[in-house]
Amino acid sequence: MSLFHNTDRIWFEWISCRRHGGEMEFEMIYTVTFNPSLDYVVQVEHFQSDAVNRTSEEHVYPGGKGNNVAVIASNLGMKSRALGFKAGFTGAAMEQMLQEFGCDTDFIALEEGVTRINVKVKSEDEFEINGQGPRIPEEKIRQLYERLDALGSGDVLVLSGSIPNTLPDDMYERIMERLAGTDVRIGVDATKDLLMNVLKYHPFLIKPNNHELGEMFGVTLKSDEEIGEYARKLQKMGARNVLVSMAGDGAILVAEDGSVLKQLPPAGEVVNSVGAGDSMVAGFLAGYLKTGSYEEALKLGTAAGSATAFTSWLADADQIRETYKGLA
């Protein structure tokens, strides 16, 4: 089943039905962002470090990998709920923005500190200044566990990004061990040890890029065959589906059913490096939950990731649809 046979009709029926309270119902996609942010993105013409610089363009977005997944899932008509921690006026603004993008939210309020602000400067070169984020006490961690305990069969949970130094460095493992046996499908988008340590809990989806995959095994991967070989190693270690993003070369999926699939990206100009991997995760999950097809999941994941790379922030539904139509 393709999401886009009779492309416009089926696509708009799916999106419109979910947005306007129709009868089509899909599983909830939950995301956890441990250290979310307000992202202040500015364009500066000819940045100079020893001078006062003025912006030519500026935007404020709700930041964090889990938040990105929630927004794209919502844009694709899925029910999404963003979890995590918020603090102060910046946390309130971040949560309000997510709600305006159509996400349900259930952030735990911290009494001290503020949700961090990350500054991203675009000029001839790009650079970032990321805030540290608030301290998260043990009591608030227990409250997050209680929220996650409510997840059940059919739900999807996405854990992505780094763990702030105010939390135990085995948070992913603790959460996955707690949810073991619940039939919650868990996706993990993390790097190296953080990812390797959760494979024993059999995540439904992991998404390293090709360079991260090679780093896990101390090798440089030079071909699709080598990428498939090492993705299968992760599968043997416990992962159910391994989705390897390869930037301009597309993506390779080593699926639970034994298939190995590759999807080339569409043609387009890359203008944004932030959120493309998160968009791929959201698109893959939305495609799979909608169709049950790994081929369609890979196509929609590639379309969502590429569409975000082709725009200034996260892609909307129309941009993803048009990008999907450009896939070979």
Image (cartoon, grey):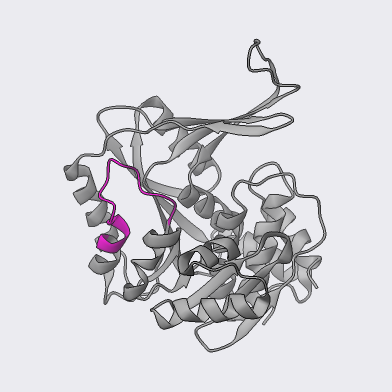
Q: Residue furthest left?
A: 139
Residue 171 falls inside the magenta stretch: yes
**Chain part drawn in magenta:** 160-174
Q: Quadrant location of residue 265?
A: bottom right
- Answer whether residue 156 is visible to the viewer in this image: yes
Work out whether residue 42 or residue 224 is closer to the camera in this orientation and state it.
224
Work out whether residue 179 or residue 224 is closer to the camera in this orientation and state it.
224
Residue at figure coordinates x 49%, y 84% from the top left? 256
228 versus 68 height, above or below: below
15 to the left or right of 98:
right
Residue 42 falls inside the magenta stretch: no
304 versus 67 height, above or below: below
- Looking at the picture, how far across and down is residue 91, in whole percent? 40, 33
147 to the left or right of 269:
left
Q: Quadrant location of residue 155?
A: bottom left
252 versus 62 height, above or below: below
All told, the count of numbered labels is 0
Q: Quadrant location of residue 113?
A: top left
- Looking at the picture, how far across and down is residue 150, in whole percent? 27, 62
Quadrant into which the C terminus falls: bottom right
- Answer whether residue 291 is visible to the viewer in this image: no
Quadrant into which the N terminus falls: bottom right
195 versus 53 height, above or below: below
Q: Overall secondary structure of the magenta stretch?
A: loop
253 to the left or right of 204:
right
Residue at figure coordinates x 26%, y 77% from the top left? 181
- Looking at the picture, how far across and down is residue 297, in whole percent? 61, 73
- Looking at the picture, how far across and down is residue 298, in whole percent? 63, 72
Q: Residue furthest bottom?
A: 258
Work out whether residue 150 or residue 296 is closer to the camera in this orientation and state it.
296
182 to the left or right of 126:
left
